Amino acid sequence: MRLRGPLANDRTAQMLHALLLLIAIWTAASSIATLQLAPITFARIFNVLVLEATLVAALAILRLGYFREASIAHLAGVWIWATLIFIFFGGVHSPGIALYVSMPISAAWLLGYRGAIWTAGVCLISALGFAVLEMNASLPPANRATPLGIWSVLVQATLINAVPVGQIIGRLRETLEELQRYRQHLELLVNQRTSELAQARDEAESANRAKTVFLANMSHELRTPLNAVLGFSRLLRNGTSSDPPRDLDIINRSGEHLLDLINHLLDVTKIEAGRNDIEIVSCDLAKLIQDVSGMILAKAEQKGLALRFEAPESPLFIRTDPSRLRQVLINLLNNAIKFTEHGSVTLRWSATPTNIADRVLLKFEVEDTGIGVAAADQARIFDAFVQAGEVDRHQGVGLGLTISRQLIGLMGGTVHMESAPGRGSCFRIELPAELVPYSDVTQGDELPAVLALEPGQPEYRILIVEDDRESSLLLESLLQNAGFAVLAVGDGAQAVEKFRDWRPQFVWMDLHLPVIDGLEAARRIRNCDGGSAVRIAAVTASGFVGSRSEILAGGLDDYLHKPYRPEEIFACMARHLGVRYTRNQADAADTKEIAVGLRVEDLATLHVDVRRELREALMTLEPERISAVIKRISHDNAVLGSILARYAGEYAYTAILRAIDAVRLPASSTGI
């Protein structure tokens, strides 16, 4: 008696199966009772046979797995049975009308609202047709329905409706419960969103306050060096300066400080925008540390702090981004010096081999004896524009640590700190790096200053496209003094026109220009006759000109950022045009004298302990300590002592360190 087949686990199919069986059993039982109490007629027997046949057909179809077809067969059988009752037992006054009324309810349960509408339409049209026929006396004489027959039809109509109505009510209850759950979910969601909006509002207000503080700090930070630049330049212009070299030095230092502030701001913005590029190259880590120490020493000495460096004895040659690593170390050391009034600042570093061949984990520590950072501030110390401690006492905008963490993260490393108020701070960096041979590291000294073009070269015509007159004059003077033929224009449209008329070999192109911008001007020049041969380099003050690949894709051959060094301008033109220069021979002679004077084989004659002591003294950058070691060397080797003294007098500490490291370095060594 149970439903079997493909629909055995379908709840609605199970209910329909049970209903069909119940109606079939009830029809058979009630028909037998009716036939025993009432006259046996063809109409009564035919009605029972038709209903039972449709029920059996619907059951068979349902067991085969066709639910919709079985439902249609069931509804069709009920409609045929009701219609026969109309015909044989009194038309619209017969009990068949109850079946017509119940059928749309069953259709809604089994076939959905569309099936219910179709079924209701069929039943209404059928009932209307029988009413019209009955009014016209067109129906055959009706048999009289017995009370038991009427009661039997009403019971069957009730059975047919009971299950669908119960199912529909159940579904409505489930829908209401689902709506209730959904309403509760919406309330929770609204509360959550309200809480998030409140938090976002608080964060926005906090960010707005931070912006206000930042603008106030930046105003002070920018005005201070600007005041020095404007004030001392005014003295020089009016001829009232008492010490012009000193004033020029102050102007230069103030300009460097301004540039440092602007670069910090651009670094933070570019990193957060995902536009900061990392350039991995080979470098000498000891030289990098030496460069950092040379930049920091003066600041430490001004505050009377001891600056210590602790490094491994073996030299290390690696692949990393040296400029970014140098920037991070300078940021951390500057920060340590800024917040340390007494004691010392120490930079120590080491390299630990990893499980991967030719890979090491670099570990740097910057430790100070300063004011320390409270536990409440340590969680936000790396946030932008945040400073711990008494902010009014310390200059800065709170970007150094933010930039440091972001740059180290870009290179695949991490930055952590340990600190306690009054006990100083220690910042630790862990950075993976690749070892390279000594021969891969580029060694070279600064080139002497360019004086002029080397004789015997063709005329080089240089077009400068720059809308800022001061910047244009600076570049014009630099190039004209070297012997180039120079023409300057102020917008992109003039650049295209002058290129057609003058045919320069090289174009310095600003990117932000009136009329048409630099990139569009470069594209139009490329489309001109001879445009493919000209070399075009961008020189821009923008911090968001894109990566080198984006610049080159725009039709340019190279680019430089303002402010630039003269050597960068001349080197760029030498790369692209093959220009040769005559240089300051005095500088070249001094460089050659230093470079030739110190030989690795001379240092190899020193005892290993003496070399170690000299190296440690050089790492401290303390002139007195370095001089003391050199004096002891002079007792045994006066010539070598004289050479080392000359190097120390020139502050060529890096050259001495390289020579010391080369003594210990075997020919095939990689640095560990």
Image: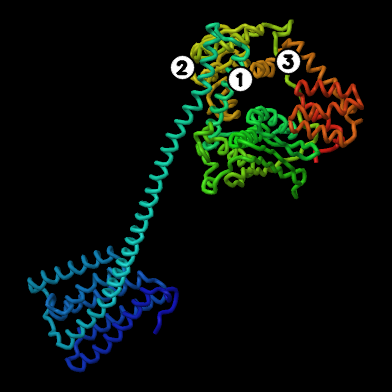
Circle 1 or circle 2, nearest the eye: 1
Q: Earlier in the sequence, mark 1 or mark 3?
A: 3
Figure check: 442 above or below 117:
above
Circle 3 or circle 2, nearest the eye: 3
Where, quadrant-wise, is the C terminus in this rendering? Answer: top right
In which image quadrant can residue 399 be found?
A: top right
Residue with the mark numbered 2: 514
In which image quadrant can residue 598 be found?
A: top right
Q: What whole-number distance in Å separates the C-alpha atoms at marks 1 and 3?
A: 17 Å
Q: What whole-number distance in Å separates the C-alpha atoms at marks 1 and 2?
A: 22 Å
Residue with the mark numbered 3: 448
Figure check: 269 above or below 248:
below
Figure check: 374 above or below 111:
above
Pick the residue in front: 341 or 636: 341
Q: What whole-number distance in Å separates the C-alpha atoms at marks 3 and 2?
A: 37 Å
Q: Amino acid at mark 2?
A: Pro
Q: Earlier in the sequence, mark 1 or mark 2?
A: 2
Question: Looking at the image, can residue 249 be seen?
Answer: yes
Q: Is residue 341 left or right of residue 454?
A: left
Element at label 3: loop
Question: Looking at the image, can residue 278 be seen?
Answer: no
Q: Residue at x 18, y 77 (%)?
A: 96
Per the rendering, the mark at residue 564 is: 1
